[in-house]
Image (spheres, helix red, strand yellow):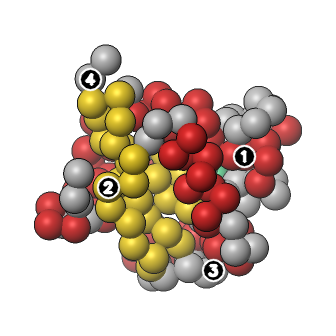
């Protein structure tokens, strides 16, 4: 297994409930290391750019509104197979379908307010990390 990096975001529903530490604990418990982390408040333009791949989806405008509604925590996670490992501990997009013990099963409010983002492929991870962090902000 190769050491990989992936982009994680703790979403506004989770920062509002002050559960960022509980989410970091879940990530670390499966062996992912937080090698960069910052809190931010996205502008509409930031969210539109990040979610450009979804711009034709019916939920796009609501998603942009949600992701700009409060603070977020952006992270780079590192570990063996980090992209897949993070997706596994996140659980399914819809918390009703998420496996017990996953972040979304435990913390998500609904399919939109689902507490975390995680890159879905190594290629997208590299692009998302470059969009959100400069090299000197990442300390492995
Ligand atoms: P994931 O975050 O699991 O990779 P997607 O990339 O498909 O899921 O969707 C991005 C985000 O858009 C989701 O995490 C969720 O916040 C929101 N979303 C996805 N599907 C829906 C939906 N059917 N209704 C409302 N919001 C949605
Ligand atoms: Mg996705």
Q: Earlier in the sequence, mark 3 or mark 4?
A: 4
The kind of secondary structure element at disc 2 is strand
The secondary structure type at the circle numbered 3 is: loop
* First-in-chain label (4 vs 1): 4
Q: Residue at x 57, y 41 (%)?
A: 29
Q: Quadrant of residue 115?
A: bottom right
119 or 138, nearer to the observer: 138
Question: Looking at the picture, does residue 18 appear above or below residue 37?
Answer: below
Label 1 vs label 3: CA separation? Answer: 19 Å
Residue 3 location in percent, x, y? 27, 30
Q: Nearer the viewer, mark 4 or mark 1?
A: 4
The answer to whether residue 122 is visible is no
Query: Going from the N terminus, do you reach mark 2 or mark 1 first?
Result: 2
Given this view, does label 1 or label 3 mark the residue nearer the observer?
1
Marks 2/4: CA distance? Answer: 16 Å
Alpha carbons under labels 2 and 3: distance apart: 26 Å
Ligand 1 within 8 Å of disc 3? The answer is no
Total number of numbered discs in the rendering: 4
Residue placed under numbered mark 1 in the picture: 104
Q: Residue at x 25, y 44 (%)?
A: 126
Q: Position of residue 8 (x, y in %)?
A: 46, 53
Instruction: Report which residue position mark 4 lands on.
Output: 2
- Position in image of residue 94 (x %, y %): 75, 41
Picture layout, residue 124 above or below residue 69: above
Res. 69 mark:
3
* Relative to 22, residue 42 above or below: below
How far apart are the two marked residues, 2 and 1, measured between alpha carbons? Answer: 22 Å
């Amino acid at each position: 297994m190769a050491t990989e990096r992936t982009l994680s975001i703790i979403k506004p529903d989770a920062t509002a409930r002050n559960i960022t530490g509980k989410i970091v604990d879940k990530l670390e418990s499966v062996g992912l290391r937080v090698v960069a982390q910052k809190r931010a408040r996205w502008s509409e333009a930031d969210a539109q750019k990040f979610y450009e791949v979804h711009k034709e989806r019916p939920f796009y405008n609501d998603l942009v509104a949600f992701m700009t509604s409060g603070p977020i925590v952006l992270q780079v996670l590192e570990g063996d197979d980090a992209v897949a490992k993070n997706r596994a501990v996140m659980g399914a997009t819809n918390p009703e379908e998420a496996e017990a013990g996953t972040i979304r099963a435990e913390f998500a409010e609904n399919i939109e307010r689902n507490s975390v983002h995680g890159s879905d492929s190594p290629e997208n991870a590299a692009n998302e990390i470059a969009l959100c962090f400069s090299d000197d902000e990442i300390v492995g």
